[in-house]
Amino acid sequence: MDLENQQRVKALTEKHGAENIVVLLGAAEAESAGLAAETVTAGDPTFAGPLAGVQLGLRVYHVVEPQFKDEVNAEVYDEQVGMMEMVLNVEEIIEEMTSIRDQFCQFK
C-alpha cells in the first residue's frame, strides 16, 4: 500500500472511527493483499509510511472473498470482477486474508 493511501486510510479512520471503516482490496496476489491487509490492521510492516507502528485493527477484505461477493449485485460483480476472479488464486487469497484478520483485526 503506497504512502498516499496509507495517509487516506489513517485520516478516514481518525475522522469516522475504526469501527466504521472497512477496507476493500483487489491485489492480484495473496502476498500483496496480505501486506496491504497487515498494514491497515497491525501497521506498516516496512515502517516506511504513515501507518508505521499504527495499529488500526480495521476490517479488511479482498473483492474475491465471499464476505464481499455475497453482498453485491451478482451481475455487477461479474462485469467488474468476474474476469479477474478466473485468473487469480482465489483460495490462496482467501487463506491469506483470513489469516490476517484472525491475527490483527479488532472489529469482526
Image (cartoon, rainbow, N blue to C red):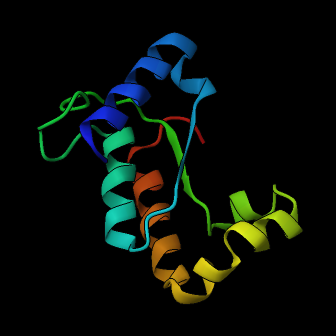
> Eyeballing the image, is 61 above or below 84?
above
Residue 61, by quadrant, is bottom right
Residue at coordinates 53% horizontally, 88% vertically from top-left?
Answer: 87
> Eyeballing the image, is 43 above or below 72?
above
Residue at coordinates 31% horizontally, 44% vertically from top-left?
Answer: 39
Number of on-image labels = 0
> Eyeballing the image, is 39 above or below 17?
below
Q: Position of residue 3 (x, y in %)?
A: 25, 36
For the residue pair 14 and 74, the one nearer the viewer reads as 74
Residue 54, by quadrant, is top left
> Eyeballing the image, is 86 above or below 101?
below
Task: Tell me the quarter of the image containing the C terminus.
Answer: top right
Q: Is residue 86 left or right of residue 53?
A: right
Q: Is residue 1 left or right of residue 92?
A: left
Q: Position of residue 98 (x, y in %)?
A: 50, 63
**Residue at the left extreme of this rendering:** 47
Residue at coordinates 82% horizontally, 63% vertically from top-left?
Answer: 76
**Residue at the top extreme of this rendering:** 15
Q: Position of residue 95 (x, y in %)?
A: 47, 73
Q: Is residue 91 left or right of residue 67?
A: left
Residue at coordinates 78% horizontally, 74% vertically from top-left?
Answer: 78
